[in-house]
Image: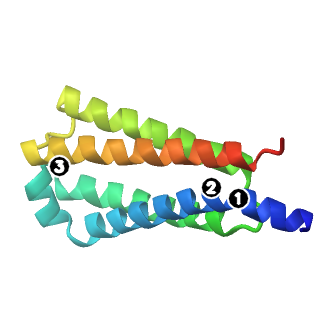
């Protein structure tokens, strides 16, 4: 077994965690962009805000996807993704608690559920990053 094989094996979990995050985030961004009006009616925030969030999520999802496809995944890049996922999680909860996003009941439930998924991605990425470290 070569050093490259060992490195690739250690990065597999991290690569999958990043790729899953990229797909879910990018898909969510596309939905917010394409259906901002109906989604806004269902969740509460106005269509303009959802389009802005959708654009951010789409670009972020693409960036995370590109990180996942690198031969050697950058630990610094991964830590940035983890940090942004934690910030997103906290901001989502804060938006529900403070009422800043004017969520409907469905929107508040969606925001908390989404925050939990993003927190799970952060945890999986932390675990994956730890697995890439040599013993």
User: SS for tag 1?
Assistant: helix
Instruction: Report the quarter where the C terminus lies.
Output: top right
Residue at image point 56% right, 43% down: 82
Question: Mark 3 or mark 2, which is nearer to you?
Answer: 2
Q: Closest to the observer: 48 or 102? A: 102
Query: Mark 1 to mark 3: distance in Å?
Result: 38 Å
Residue at image point 33% right, 70% down: 30
Residue 14's disc is: 2
Q: Closest to the observer: 28 or 2? A: 2
Question: Which residue, given by chain and number where applicable, does mark 3 sit on?
Answer: 45
Mark 2 or mark 3, which is nearer the start of the sequence?
2
Query: Mark 3 to mark 2: distance in Å?
Result: 33 Å
Local crowd at mark 2 within 10 Å, few (<14), some, or many (≥20)?
many
Q: Position of residue 53 (x, y in %)?
A: 34, 54
Is 61 placed left or right of 131 in the picture?
left
Question: Mark 1 or mark 3, which is nearer to you?
Answer: 1
């Amino acid at each position: 077994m070569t050093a490259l094989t060992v490195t690739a094996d250690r990065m597999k979990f991290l690569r999958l965690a990043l790729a899953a995050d990229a797909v879910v985030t990018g898909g969510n961004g596309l939905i917010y962009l394409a259906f901002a009006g109906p989604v806004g009616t269902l969740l509460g925030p106005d269509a303009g805000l959802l389009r802005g969030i959708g654009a951010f999520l789409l670009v972020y999802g693409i960036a995370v996807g590109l990180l996942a496809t690198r031969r050697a995944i950058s630990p610094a890049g991964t830590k940035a993704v983890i940090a942004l996922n934690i910030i997103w999680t906290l901001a989502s909860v804060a938006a529900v608690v403070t009422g800043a996003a004017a969520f409907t009941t469905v929107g508040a439930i969606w925001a908390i559920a989404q925050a939990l998924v993003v927190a799970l991605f952060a945890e999986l990425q932390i675990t994956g990053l730890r697995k890439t470290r040599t013993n």
